[in-house]
Image: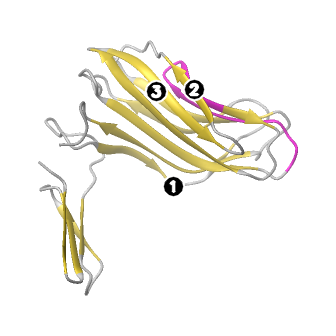
């Protein structure tokens, strides 16, 4: 299936040949594909596995999980399939030491830390399957004042479940690191068809 965008006069129809949902009334008309909460068998366009919309902040000085998802066994089963995590939030307006991080199983796939004062942050991390049943490479870009790039090699066995999470840590106390939102999506090998 190919993604299509068709613009006719004032109307715009966006679709993928899947179930679609009408958004809005009158012109312009926009049709948006429904997003599944899990990827059906044979689904080759990618799908959103989880979305976090409720803000969460660190508690105390220990690493606090701000968002978590347990990836079902065999979700990543073919060479080139990917998980894409995007998360965003802010650091409190103070001089405390703060760190935001994301994990794929036991492997830290992104990290960004320092004494940031009232700035926004964003994580954009991708894990790609390198061999059947094994995670291979992870690449992340985390932004705040300056970008930080981290490349890692998760060694998770994908025939079992894998926990994906975003954490926040403060060297001083609660509420220094806030997650405002995030989403986790599955992407097929070779891009969208």
User: Real-space Cα distance between discs 3 and 1?
Assistant: 19 Å
Query: Which mark is first along the chain, 2 or 3?
Result: 2
Q: Residue at x 17, y 40 (%)?
A: 43
Write down the residue under mark 1: 53
**CB-based contact (under 8 Å), mark 1 and mark 2:** no
Picture colour scheme: secondary structure
User: Where 37 falls versus 163 (above or below)?
Assistant: below
Between residue 51 and residue 43, name the one nearer to us: 43
Q: Quadrant of residue 42?
A: top left
Q: Quadrant of residue 169?
A: top right
Secondary structure at numbered mark 1 = loop
Secondary structure that dominates the magenta span: strand
Q: Residues within 10 Å of mark 3 (few under 14, many from 20)?
A: some
Q: Is residue 32 magenta?
A: no
Provide the residue span drawn in magenta. 94-111
Q: Residue at x 46, y 27 (%)?
A: 163
Residue found at the very far bottom of the displayed protein = 26
Q: Residues within 10 Å of mark 1 (few under 14, many from 20)?
A: few
Secondary structure at numbered mark 2 = strand
Q: Is residue 106 magenta?
A: yes
Q: Position of residue 53 (x, y in %)?
A: 51, 55
Write down the residue under mark 2: 150
Task: Give the mark toward the camera: 1 or 2.
Answer: 2
Image position of 186 (left or right of 176): left
Q: Position of residue 91 (x, y in %)?
A: 73, 48
Between residue 143 and residue 100, name the one nearer to us: 143
**CB-based contact (under 8 Å), mark 3 and mark 2:** no
Q: Which mark, by number, is residue 163?
A: 3
Query: Which mark is first along the chain, 2 or 1?
Result: 1
Q: Residue at x 71, y 41 (%)?
A: 58
């Amino acid at each position: 299936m190919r993604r299509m965008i068709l613009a006719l006069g004032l109307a715009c129809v966006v679709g993928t040949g899947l179930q679609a949902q009408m958004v809005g009334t009158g012109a312009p008309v926009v049709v948006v594909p429904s997003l599944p909460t899990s990827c059906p068998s044979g689904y080759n366009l990618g799908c959103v596995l989880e979305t976090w919309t409720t803000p969460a902040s660190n508690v105390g000085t220990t690493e606090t999980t701000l968002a978590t998802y347990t990836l079902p066994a065999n979700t990543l089963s073919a060479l080139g399939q990917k998980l894409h995590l995007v998360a965003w939030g802010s650091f409190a307006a103070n001089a405390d030491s703060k760190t935001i991080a994301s994990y794929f199983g036991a492997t830290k796939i992104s990290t960004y830390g320092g004494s940031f004062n009232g700035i926004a942050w964003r994580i954009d991390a991708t894990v790609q399957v390198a061999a059947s049943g094994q995670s291979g490479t992870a690449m992340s870009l985390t932004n705040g004042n300056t970008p930080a790039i981290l490349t890692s090699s998760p060694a998770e066995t994908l025939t079992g479940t894998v926990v994906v999470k975003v954490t926040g840590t403060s060297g001083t106390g609660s509420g220094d690191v806030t997650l405002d939102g995030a989403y986790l999506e599955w992407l097929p090998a070779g891009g969208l068809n």
